Structures are given as structure tokens and as C-alpha cells.
Image: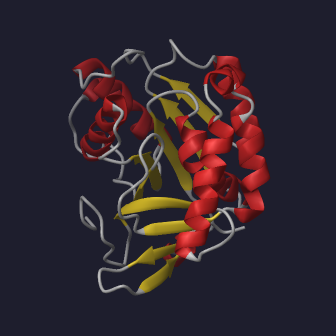
Amino acid sequence: MDPDRVVRTEDGGSHVHSGNQLGRKTDRVLVVSPHRDDETIGCGGALCAHAARGDAVGVVHLCGTGGATEAEAQAAAAVLGVTEMVTLGGDPIQLGADRRLFVELVAVLRSFRPTTLYIPHADDDDPSHRTAHELAMEARWAAAYPVYPEAGEPCSVPDEVYAYEVWTPLARPSAFVDITQHAAQKEKALRQYDSQIELARWDEGALGLNRYRGVTSGCGDYVEAFDALRVPRFHARGRQGGS
């Protein structure tokens, strides 16, 4: 399956956007995830779709302690089709925009060289998620310039950037991915995070939101919603514009 997105325009119109419009056979997809399990809650269905079409899918967790275990994350990654996973040294209680974590993230971007980037949205009520958004937006530019030589050789800025929802739903999502074919796979991946499911039924909450997005968007039975921050060849509504 090719993860096509219905991207809404300011005038109420829509545009079906696919990575194939760039002339690429496959993409390199990277998710910036504040904590282990955020990637699955926010865009697990889209990741399944990417993996199904042969894209390389990577996840970088900004912190790896104080929550889900590495074993749980590895099990979820196997279900989603994630091919590479990295855990950085962010504070597990409150992520901070410190230089060390920023350079670590720049190094991951330069190493993985993504063409598509998924990040938390800017207005999430969780402060760590907002910090992750800011770090990712800055790191994607820094990775392309000859700065922070300790982080490796510069790379191109990702062609596409989408902001996903976890703790707080997006007020005005501008891109939608039909994940109906992958809803059961996403649910299975979420249930690999046993320690988190014991605290709250994230599997039910995430799939419930996806069902709601399907009903309100008309894009499928189960849908993931995003803010399209960068979409090539098409000007989409996004907090950061189309650049």
C-alpha cells in the first residue's frame, strides 16, 4: 500500500498527495518520538503503510527511561515494520532543549537521511511533546548545514514533514491517512507496550481517535490525522508553512 494522504487546502478543497509524486520508488521515513510508544499512538498506521510499500522506517526515541522498556519498543517495532530504532539520552521526566540532546538528534538525521519526517505537533499539552516538536524542527535545518561537525556530514532537508497527535488532538488537521487496512496491526503494536497499557488503555484511545478521524474526515474507516508542515509541489496549510 502506498500511504497516500488527503491534504486539505485553505479554501476547503483537497489534494491527494503521495511520495510517488516525487519520482521515488521508496522513501526513508523517520519518526521523532518523545517517549517509547508515542510513535505507535501517533502514526503507527502510517508506518505500517510505509513498511508495506518497502520504505525504510526508523524511529528515534528522545528518552528511554522512566516509561516503556526497550524490549516493548523492539516488539512494537517488529509489528510496525520499523527497520531502525535509536534511543537518545533525554530526561525521562521533562525533555529539555539542551545542546547535547539537540546534537544527538542532528546526528541521527544525518545518519538516517530521511526523506519524510514525522514529529509531534506544536500544540500538544504535554510539555515534552512540544519540546520534541521544537527540537525536531530546528534539527532538520541544522542537519543540512556545515555546523556541529561532531554530528557527521550534512544531509538534505526532508522533503515532507508531518506533525502527529498523541496526548492532545490537532485542532485543525490538514492531512489524513486512511489506515483501515493496518488498524489491527497498529492495535497489535500498541499492545506490545504492556507496561503502558496497564496504566491507561492507549490501544483503545488511539484506535478510538482514528475511528473518529475516519468519520469526520470521510477518508476511511480508521484514519490518522496530521498537520502537513512541508509537502513538496503543493502549498498546504501548516504552522510552519510549506517551506
**Closest to the observer: 173 or 150?**
173
**Closest to the observer: 111 or 190?**
190
Q: Residue at x 78, y 40 (%)?
A: 188
Quadrant of the image containing the C terminus:
bottom left
Quadrant of the image containing the N terminus:
bottom right
Relative vertical location of residue 197 with respect to residue 116 in this rendering, above or below: above
**Residue 100 is drawn in which quadrant?**
top left
**Residue 97 x %, y %:** 24, 26
Query: How many numbered marks does the figure carry?
Result: 0
Q: Residue at x 60, y 20 (%)?
A: 68
Q: Residue at x 68, y 22 (%)?
A: 198
**Residue 15 x %, y %:** 46, 83
**Closest to the observer: 151 or 5?**
5
Q: Is residue 53 left or right of residue 105?
A: right
**Residue 67 x %, y %:** 55, 17
Relative vertical location of residue 153 with respect to residue 70 in this rendering, above or below: below
Q: Residue at x 69, y 37 (%)?
A: 190
- Quick one: which residue is furthest to the top in this view? 66
**Closest to the observer: 31 or 184?**
184
Colouring convention used in this rendered image of the protein: secondary structure
Relative vertical location of residue 162 with respect to residue 32 in this rendering, above or below: below
